[in-house]
Image (cartoon, grey):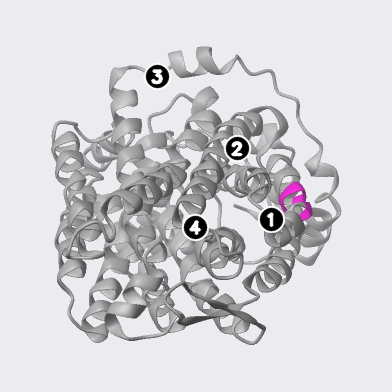
């Protein structure tokens, strides 16, 4: 966006759809922009139909795009949390420490950015459908391979590759679900789609109780099962066409003599040049949100079991209730963002989530399930706004790349969250716990680390939301941006 657009009110920003060169940011414009950051948080109080009417706006094809994206994102989450929920079993199987196993989580998060770049560029250039399917095929292969790993090195190698596959799915799923969605319903639909993450975590928790250590193969059937549902999701996606928005862009390219197709790299360079500051902002914000998510979730089952002495059933109940809270918060906050604005909605749930960290981390009885419900309500409530918030700020021709890459670069920056918490937690040992067989289990104060660490992350996220831009209601299906970029490239090449 042009510097002057930073200080336009929301309606003018939406109506102008003007993406001029913003390679130079004038000091005066920056000062004006900074001066409006707090006042621009004022809720617009937009009149929005009730949720049932909003969902009724979607036609059958739009519902199908939403459902396939939701299921794919759910299984991305399921496959990720298979490791988080079997940390102790994996550590015993490979004769490693908890911290060593969390490196499997860290590698996945680190390499997601590679997948987001590869699959994001492919989806924006060639279509959403086949990169989506290719990522799911890799899910099948690599989840099966995890179940057959015999050594710690094999485990790390397979999970690293899994990170690339997972990185390729999120941006594609988000754009597929929202690209053709009616503008009025995008906040609610985006919130619901994002809750595939919480739904996947819930499924992972439930199936871990059903499949882990219930046969002589220990934890391995859990991963073998994880390779099965993507087959159904692939069949579902094969039955659907490309989104209308992508097909409209393809028609525009054809109408301009394939110039846009032939200058795809030039478009990308120009889009990044014009939007580089917004892209950096989205990466920084995504970093905070990924820390928020993984910092409250990845090591939490280990904390409940190791520090609090919860039984496997009690851990499962707590995690299920937490994810029900996440799904409720996601749907609620996504809808509210249409009324109160994207940034204001995120800000409110971040403040509430930060205030709940103490009971979430220090309550020692099973009453902690109440805190877990509301903390995850807030975490996923904040996340629910992110898909549409990023799409509205991204250049329309590169939405998959920008949304996916911003999210996954944030994952890269926050990839060591569980390892950081595990390492710091081991510096605060507690009295060891004697087992019925006479063995002794080392215990650590993970709760203290989670509380302090996440307090800093919430403060960081709140600050970024306050200083950030917003384009609530921007029409991401408009191909005018594509045409403007193409015409500019033509002029620059004297065509």
- Pick the front one: 385 or 280: 385
Q: Is residue 380 magenta?
A: no
The answer to whether marks 4 and 3 mark residues whose Cβ atoms lie closer than 8 Å is no
Magenta region, residue range: 351-355
> Residue drawn 47% across and 59% down?
407
Residue 47, percent from left and from top: 69, 18
Q: Is residue 123 above or below residue 144?
A: above
The disc, 3 or 1, on the residue closer to the chain's N-terminal end is: 3
In the image, 133: left or right of 175? left
Q: Which residue is mark 2?
A: 329
Q: Secondary structure at mark 2?
A: helix
Q: Which residue is mark 1?
A: 360
Q: Nearer the viewer, mark 3 or mark 1?
A: 1
> Residue drawn 76% across and 60% down?
463
The disc, 4 or 1, on the residue closer to the chain's N-terminal end is: 4
In the image, 291: left or right of 494? right
> From mark 4 to mark 3, how far is it between C-alphas?
44 Å
What is the number of the mark on residue 58? 3
Graded by Cα atoms within 10 Å as few (under 14), some (14 to 19) or many (20 or more), the crowding at tag 4 reads: few
Residue 304 seen in the figure? yes
Q: Secondary structure at mark 3?
A: loop
The disc, 1 or 2, on the residue closer to the chain's N-terminal end is: 2
> From mark 1 to mark 2, how far is it between C-alphas?
16 Å
> Residue drawn 21% across and 84% down?
151
Q: Which residue is mark 4?
A: 311
Residue 22 seen in the figure? no
In the image, 326: left or right of 97? right
The disc, 2 or 3, on the residue closer to the chain's N-terminal end is: 3
Q: Quadrant of residue 430?
A: bottom right
> From mark 3 to mark 1, how far is it between C-alphas?
38 Å
């Amino acid at each position: 966006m042009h510097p002057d657009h930073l200080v336009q009110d929301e309606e003018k920003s939406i109506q102008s759809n003007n993406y001029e060169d913003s390679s130079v940011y004038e000091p005066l414009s920056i000062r004006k922009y900074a001066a409006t950051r707090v006042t621009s948080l004022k809720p617009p109080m937009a009149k929005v139909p009730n949720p049932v009417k909003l969902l009724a706006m979607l036609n059958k094809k739009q519902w199908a795009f939403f459902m396939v994206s939701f299921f794919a994102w759910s299984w991305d989450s399921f496959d990720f949390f298979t490791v988080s929920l079997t940390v102790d079993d994996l550590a015993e199987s490979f004769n490693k420490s908890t911290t060593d196993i969390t490196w499997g989580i860290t590698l996945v998060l680190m390499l997601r950015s590679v997948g987001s770049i590869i699959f994001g560029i492919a989806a924006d250039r060639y279509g959403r459908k086949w990169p989506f399917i290719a990522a799911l095929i890799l899910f099948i292969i690599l989840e099966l391979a995890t179940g057959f790993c015999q050594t710690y090195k094999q485990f790390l190698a397979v999970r690293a590759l899994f990170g690339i596959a997972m990185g390729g799915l999120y941006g594609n799923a988000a754009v597929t679900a929202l690209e053709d969605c009616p503008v009025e319903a995008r906040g609610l639909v985006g919130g619901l789609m994002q809750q595939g993450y919480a739904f996947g975590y819930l499924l992972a928790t439930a199936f871990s109780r059903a499949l882990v250590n219930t046969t002589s193969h220990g934890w391995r059937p859990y991963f073998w099962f994880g390779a099965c549902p993507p087959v159904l999701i692939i069949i579902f996606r094969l039955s659907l066409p490309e989104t209308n928005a992508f097909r409209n862009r393809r028609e525009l390219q054809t109408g301009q003599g394939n110039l846009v197709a032939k200058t795809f790299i030039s478009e990308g360079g120009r889009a990044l040049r014009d939007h580089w500051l917004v892209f950096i902002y989205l990466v920084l914000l995504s970093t905070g949100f990924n820390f928020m998510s993984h910092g409250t979730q990845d090591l939490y089952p280990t904390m409940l079991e190791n520090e609090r002495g919860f039984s496997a059933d009690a851990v499962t109940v707590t995690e299920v209730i937490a994810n029900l809270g996440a799904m409720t918060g996601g749907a609620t906050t996504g809808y509210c963002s249409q009324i109160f604005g994207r940034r204001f909605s995120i800000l409110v749930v971040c403040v509430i989530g930060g205030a709940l960290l103490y009971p979430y981390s220090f309550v020692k009885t099973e009453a902690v399930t109440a805190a877990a419900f509301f903390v995850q309500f807030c975490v996923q409530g904040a996340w629910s706004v992110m898909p549409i918030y990023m799409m509205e700020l991204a250049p329309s021709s590169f939405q998959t790349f920008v949304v996916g890459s911003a999210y996954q670069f944030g994952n890269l920056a926050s990839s060591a969250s569980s390892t950081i918490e595990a390492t710091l937690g081991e510096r605060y040992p507690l009295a060891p716990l004697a087992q019925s067989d006479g063995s002794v289990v080392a215990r650590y104060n993970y709760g203290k680390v989670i509380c302090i660490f996440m307090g800093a992350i919430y403060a960081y996220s709140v600050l970024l939301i306050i200083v950030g831009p917003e384009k609530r209601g921007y029409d991401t299906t408009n191909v005018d941006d594509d045409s403007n970029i193409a015409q500019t490239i033509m002029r620059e090449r004297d065509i």
